[in-house]
Image (cartoon, rainbow, N blue to C red):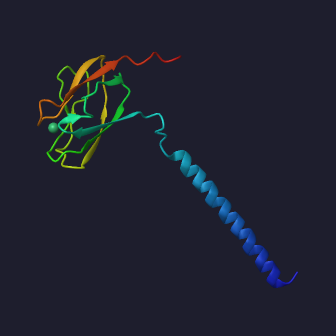
Amino acid sequence: MSVRNNVIAIVAISCIVVGGLWAVGNLTKETKEADVSHVEGILLLAERSTFNSTNPDISVQVDVPKKLVVLNKDIVIHDLQIKDNSGGILNFETAPLKTEQHFNAAIVAYKPGTYEYFCSYHPTMRGKIIATPAPASAS
Ligand SMILES: [Cu+2]
């Protein structure tokens, strides 16, 4: 074998090793990412001064956070708030949302019960959050 062939062989092996390391690195990186495939989400469109036309009931399970995205499709400002003094649900309020602005939040109920979400600007925009006990774990 000539020197030139040896150099080519070494370069080829280096490429395989580096490529292998890169692949392994990507694999390990992949497993470190949070698995959110089980997360159920809800999208509420604020449109014509209702949420999703019907102000739908939102069902959640106690202690199981549900992702909530509020998107304003109106010209006027909307928000979404949960204000409950029973301690049964996480209270929050979105920012005042202008047209096409959205806000990510999570609904987290601590106790079974019926709670309310509403827009602080429009009394017509209110709906129920129904929290039921999470199923007993299979232990
Ligand atoms: Cu509103």
Front one among 125 and 131: 125
- Residue with the most extreme bottom position: 3
| Numbered label tally | 0
Front residue of 107/98: it is: 98
Residue at 47% across, 33% down: 38
Residue 137 vs residue 41, the one in the foreground: 41
- Residue 89 in the image: x percent, y percent? 26, 25
Q: Classify residue 4 by image quadrant.
A: bottom right
Is residue 76 toward the left or the right of residue 18 in the image? left
Residue 87 location, quadrant: top left
Image quadrant where one finds the N terminus: bottom right
Residue drawn at (49%, 18%) of the image: 137
Judge by depth and name the residue closer to the eye, 133 or 114.
114
Task: Residue at 16% x, 34% y: name it.
Answer: 119
**Horizontal arrangement in the rendering, residue 8 relative to residue 1 (left or right):** left
Q: Residue at x 17, y 28 (%)?
A: 83
Q: Quadrant of residue 2?
A: bottom right
Q: Is residue 134 above or below residue 101?
A: above
Q: Quadrant of ligand 1?
A: top left
| Residue 108 placement, left or right of 40 | left
Farthest residue toward the right? 1
Residue 13 locus on image (x, y percent): 75, 69
Q: Residue 110: x and y, percent?
A: 30, 22
Q: Position of residue 128 (x, y in %)?
A: 24, 23
